[in-house]
Image (spheres, grey):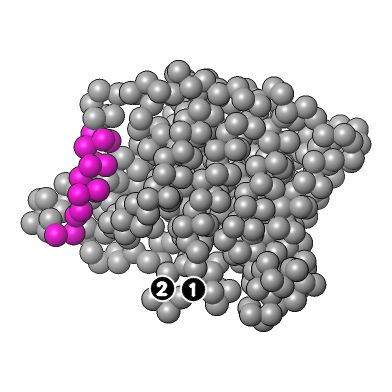
Amino acid sequence: MLDTLFALRARGTTVWREVVAGFTTFMAMSYVLFVNPAMLAQAGMDHGAVFVATCLAAALGCLLMGLLANLPVALAPGMGLNAFFTYVIVLEQGHSWQTALACVFFSGCLFLLLSIFKIREWIINSIPLPLKMGIAAGIGMFLALIALKTANIIVASPATLVTLGDLHSPQVLLALAGFFIIFALAHRGWHAAVLISILSVTAAAWWLGDTQFNAVVSMPPAVSATFMQLDFAAALSLSMLPVILSLLFLDLFDTSGTLVAVTHKAGLMQKNGTVPDLSKALIADSSATIAGAMLGTSTTTSYVESSSGVAAGGRTGLMAVVTGLLFLLALWFSPLAAMVPSYATAGALLYVATLMLSSLKHVEWDDVIQAVPVCVVLIMMPLTFSIADGIGMGFISYAVLCLLTGKLQHTTISVWLLTLVFLAKFIWG
């Protein structure tokens, strides 16, 4: 039955290999169970409810991807997208988390429509590669700033805006230790490097009396505090359109890049460079985002950590199904997630930031039209503490440079449409 459903023999794999790959993928991305609730709690959301929503959204996304698209790709609430949710929509712009959830819901609906009518390919292909790479790297810089701020490695200064924190602080030292543990273990091929780092720092924090141990396993918390708490009326105002579009395009870039990278590594990409069953994969991704918003979490997206499962032999959707079932099992480990201090997750955010910065290798730095917009995004995204503002300034600088240098052939209709949207946001927003 499993062979018929997932084409195991056709892809040269076995049930056992897929199970091992699914477990490997879960261990590689399980840090989201600690990071996501901690980050969304800063937006005023209930930590326990977000933990449950994270588990359920990830499980649903993985099951949909495995059963619909039969691809070895796992999903969960995305890093960068949750930062945009908390630090930009809620803390910077002052919207309620209920409004932010409704924006996630509408962006998921738009994503679903674009997937069904196959408009997504036109949008992604018409946006210049440098901007795609710059946005990915810019989000990495933004995550790095959040991590350094959370761990008090970087603190505010009235004289210089920011400065180095107290390196004698146990919290700062533990955060730095967590960061180096991840890279040391990842270098040796430990797929659970991030999870081990978070648990090690948490254990040290408990020993120092910084956190309290209650239990490891318990009944899952209630999700009622966030379930169906979306403020649709507030999200439907015209001023929220740039926010919804930003969420949509962040998810588009994230999902597209991940699907290409993972399917290529698995040897599943077709000869013409397309992803097999791409429309089904995108429907699974967007459906998980919609369901996640209703449950109470930020955008659910495909995870590049799925490549660790592919490296362990995963080739079919059975790997994703196993990962999804493990996320359901994780529902009973909420006490462990609750005792993780914020600085214990800083190393994980720095690790993800480093991986995202690798996209800069695709930028041709000798080409001003490529280099300048990427630099604008890299600088403005962390310094304005806004992913949306960084993306907007990147689009505007790219369009203006192409216009002034007489290279309008490098632009597309979608680039100018997005540039006008961001210009309107800066002028009237």
Q: Is residue 45 above or below residue 302?
A: above
Nearer to the camera, 202 or 323: 323
Q: Residue furthest top?
A: 233
Residue drawn 25% across the image and 66% down it: 366
Q: Is residue 356 visible?
A: no
Query: How packed is label 1: few (under 14 Cα within 10 Å), some, or many (20 or more)?
Result: some
Residue 413 lies in the magenta-colored region: yes
Q: Is residue 101 left or right of residue 3?
A: left
Cβ–Cβ under 8 Å for marks 1 and 2? yes
> Magenta segment range?
409-423
Amino acid carrying label 2: it is Gly
- Per the image, label 1 sits on a secondary structure element best described as loop
Disc marking residue 124: none
Disc marking residue 273: 2
Counting from the top left corner in percent of width and height, residue 291 is at: 60, 38
CA gap, disc 1 and disc 2: 6 Å
Amino acid carrying label 1: it is Met
Q: Is residue 310 left or right of residue 243?
A: right
Counting from the top left corner in percent of width and height, residue 47 is at: 71, 29
- In which quadrant of the rendered image does the N terminus lie? bottom right
Residue drawn 27% across the image and 42% down it: 418
Q: Is residue 362 above or below residue 392?
A: below
The residue tagged 1 is 269
Counting from the top left corner in percent of width and height, residue 252 is at: 43, 50
Residue drawn 34% across the image and 23% down it: 239
Q: Quadrant of residue 298?
A: top right
